[in-house]
Image (cartoon, helix red, strand yellow):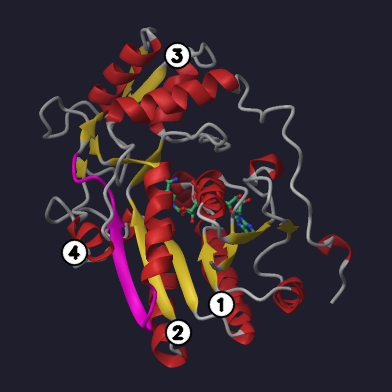
């Protein structure tokens, strides 16, 4: 069993992955600055170090107090619209902060690293479905920062004999009993539609109904957050030799915005009022993964990623957390140390 440091473990995908690691018998420590995450999202059993990953003193302390076998790196700024309007903060946090963190990992001698990358590294697809060899031409600074850290990791893998897996998620979606999607501001389609179904929004804005797709709306590949977590655990088991490998995480099947709206209406029994708006710059018509490599090399098979299952799980979570607050009886995770008080 491994002792895994999870950055961003108080966030949406990271918290589900922590729970899966614990369920599989691994030990977990979370480092998260709670900038977009939530203390109560960290599963019981995973101590939380409340710190910026780019704080070298805090990271030195964390690594000196713990012996980790692997790092799962989820912490990042991840809202695409913000990356377009404010690229500087993305390069500062995801790239400069990311490399400062890699240096802390290197100093501690940890050599297994799983990186949360994104389909955004590919940019506008030249062929669909997209495989890992597809050209990498990001169309927003978010994707560019993910690609830059991937490239840095390739050099770390070759120079320092790290074993690195970059997992390029397509659209993470759905919920577990304990964790659901909750970004602020929310920009992801399924939580926006569910907020509309629950009466928290008057309408859903549909950007572009004139794409060259069967019903004119954009097509995306949705993958349940539990299936993403499963891919991380498979990657951990597979990291035996040095080098870097990238895998797409997607189902290989796309759903249009209209299909998602209709599935949300079926699951919730509510009609979703729509407002139509022009296409958004940089939104390709179809984004769909070719996940063959992940299936062939790591034996991954999605088991929760049918669209109805994704939406049902997210709706159940939403009903249990009407204002997206966490269950009141949940106890905060213990903190390893008060890094705020640490002046190194
Ligand atoms: N959600 C998706 O559809 C999706 C798709 C592709 C890739 N990803 C990637 O997956 C990862 C997790 O995404 P998410 O949707 O769970 O986002 P999230 O915002 O819910 O989680 C990110 C977590 O990282 C923490 N964090 C951010 N910067 C930090 C820093 N400097 N130091 C310490 N903690 C920090 C936040 O507080 C938060 O808890 C991100 O790297 C994201 O780019 C997500």
Q: Badges 1 and 4: C-beta atoms under 8 Å apart?
A: no
According to the image, label 1 marks what residue?
102
Distance Cα–Cα, label 4 vs label 2: 23 Å
Distance Cα–Cα, label 2 vs label 1: 9 Å
Q: Mark 4 falls on what kind of element?
A: loop
- What label sits on residue 156 in the rendered view? 2
Q: Residue at x 40, y 52 (%)?
A: 230
According to the image, label 3 marks what residue?
197
- What label sits on residue 134 in the rendered view? 4
Distance Cα–Cα, label 1 vs label 3: 42 Å
Location of the C terminus (image quadrant): bottom right
- Left or right: where does residue 145 sit relative to residue 207? right
Q: Is residue 147 visible?
A: no
Q: In the image, is residue 47 part of the stretch drawn in magenta?
A: no
Q: Mark 3 falls on what kind of element?
A: helix
In terms of sequence position, does the residue under pointer 1 or pointer 3 come before the other? 1
Relative image position of residue 247 (x, y in whole percent): 29, 63
- Left or right: where does residue 71 sit relative to residue 337? left
**Label 2: few (<14), some (14–19) or many (≥20) C-alpha neighbours in 10 Å:** many
Q: Is residue 233 above or below residue 261?
A: below
Q: Mark 1 falls on what kind of element?
A: helix
Q: Is residue 38 visible?
A: yes
């Amino acid at each position: 069993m491994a002792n895994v440091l999870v950055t961003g473990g108080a966030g949406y995908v990271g918290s589900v992955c922590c729970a899966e690691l614990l369920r599989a018998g691994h030990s977990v420590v979370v480092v998260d600055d709670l900038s977009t995450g939530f203390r109560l999202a960290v599963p019981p059993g995973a101590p939380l170090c409340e710190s910026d990953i780019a704080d070298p003193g805090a990271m030195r302390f964390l690594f000196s107090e713990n012996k980790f076998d692997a790092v799962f790196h989820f912490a990042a700024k991840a809202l695409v619209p913000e990356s377009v309007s404010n690229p500087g903060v993305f390069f500062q946090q995801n790239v400069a902060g990311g490399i400062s963190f890699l240096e802390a990992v290197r100093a501690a001698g940890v050599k297994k690293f799983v990186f949360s990358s994104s389909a955004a590294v590919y940019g506008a697809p030249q062929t669909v479905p997209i495989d890992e060899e597809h050209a990498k031409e990001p169309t927003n600074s978010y994707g560019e920062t993910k690609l830059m850290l991937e490239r840095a990791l390739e050099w770390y893998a070759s120079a320092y004999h790290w074993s690195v897996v970059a997992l390029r998620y397509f659209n993470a979606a759905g919920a577990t009993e304990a964790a659901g999607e909750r970004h602020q501001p929310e920009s992801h389609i399924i939580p926006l539609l569910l907020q509309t179904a629950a009466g928290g929004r008057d309408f859903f804005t549909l950007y572009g109904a004139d794409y060259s797709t069967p019903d004119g709306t954009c097509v995306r590949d949705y993958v349940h957050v539990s299936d993403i977590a499963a891919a991380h655990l498979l990657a951990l088991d597979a990291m035996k030799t040095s080098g870097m490998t990238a895998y797409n995480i997607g189902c290989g099947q796309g759903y249009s915005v209209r299909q998602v709206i209709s599935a949300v209406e079926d699951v919730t029994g509510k009609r979703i009022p729509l407002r139509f708006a022009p296409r958004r710059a940089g939104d390709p018509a179809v984004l769909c993964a070719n996940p063959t490599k992940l299936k062939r090399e790591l034996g991954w098979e999605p088991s929760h990623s049918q669209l109805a299952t994704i939406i049902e799980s997210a709706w159940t979570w939403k009903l249990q957390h009407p204002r997206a607050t966490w269950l009141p009886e949940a106890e905060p995770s213990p903190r390893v140390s008060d890094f705020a008080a640490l002046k190194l």
